[in-house]
Amino acid sequence: MRNSRIYLLVFVLVAFTCAPHALSAVKLQKTRLTLPAKSLTFFPYYFGKDKRFFEEEGLELELIIMRPPLGVTALQSGDLDYSAAASLSMRAALKGAPLRALMFIQTRLSFSLVGQPGMTAQKISTVGVSGLGSLAHYAALMVMKKIGRGGAGDKATYLTTNTTAESYAALVGKAVDATILSPPYTSIATLAGYTDLGNAFEVRDFQGGLSARTDHLQQKREQAKAMIRATLKSVDYIVRHESESVAYLQKEFRLDPRVASGSYKIIQQVLNVDGDVEESVLRSVVESMKKDAQMTAADVPLDRVADLSLLREVRAEAANKR
């Protein structure tokens, strides 16, 4: 009996001695990621947090929604650690901001052109886009060209709606003949009887990704790699698990089952599983950004806007473990 008490006392002492070390071993790093909106473009971050992929990498991820200009400013000032709006960070980097894109979760546009019931390409005179010069506007021009419109002398007028939700509202209110939508609004509209006129899924550009300050990358390189690993896990899981992903869309984004299913099918087509992009595509996007910003510099080094070295390290390390 006495020996049992001694063993118990020793066990308790060891437990108390080891507890602080055990707790410190599992302590998570608080990590702040800004997103422009709670939209399906950034679905992998919400899903990955829910599946605890970021915790598995030692990160306590906080998702902070901020309007794009404010998010970029907060990222530059150090109030935030990362941004999911990689293309916005790249545009800021072109102007000298110390920001770099680290990976891209979409390198194909998820926009569709949806028209009034019975609308045809020839009848379109007004098109709603979230903003002139935006990716939605660019997508609208590409789809219009694909369906035989948009050439010299084309009289289609592009109207600013500010957001995709308002683009859908403009369609419902018959303020436009057609509008550019992305999930879930694409499925909501087509299920309601509006006409799917075409999509921009084959157009190469960036919707969503990961970016950070250059000094943050120098100081917290391993943390940045952990963010990349967790994001890749989430994207890969979403692509391979349709039923679970659709169920999550219904729950987290409060979508009708048919809307969730239709939205998933679009997301699955445009998600970028490896996070990487061909140099030619990156160069093309940068050139478009320069043109939009009316920059006259003959050439901009790609490493001024993107640093994909950490992503490639992460993928090489994962390949070596297989």
Image (spheres, rainbow, N blue to C red):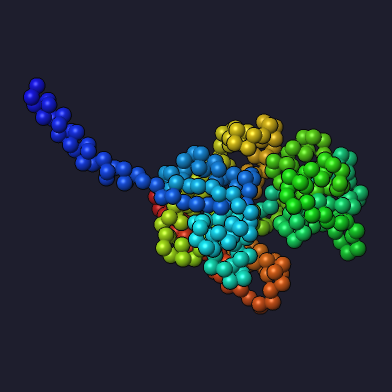
Residue 68 sits in quarter = bottom right
Identified at 73% across, 38% down, the residue is 187
Q: Say how many tags the image has.
A: 0
Q: Position of residue 202 (x, y in %)?
A: 70, 53
> Relative to residue 235, is residue 211 depicted above or below?
below
Residue closest to the eye, 165 or 236:
165
Q: Position of residue 101 (x, y in %)?
A: 55, 61
> Relative to residue 78, is residue 63 depicted above or below?
above
Q: Position of residue 11 (x, y in %)?
A: 18, 33
Horizontal side, residue 60 vs residue 139: left or right: left
Does the rendering let one see residue 49?
yes
> Relative to residue 76, is residue 192 depicted above or below?
above
Residue 90 sits in quarter = bottom right
Image quadrant in which the N terminus is located: top left
Residue farthest toward the left in the current orientation of the protein:
2
Identified at 76% across, 46% down, the residue is 166
Identified at 43% across, 55% down, the residue is 223
Does the rendering let one see residue 104?
no
Identified at 85% across, 59% down, the residue is 150
Q: Position of residue 145 (x, y in %)?
A: 82, 57
Residue farthest toward the top in the current orientation of the protein:
1
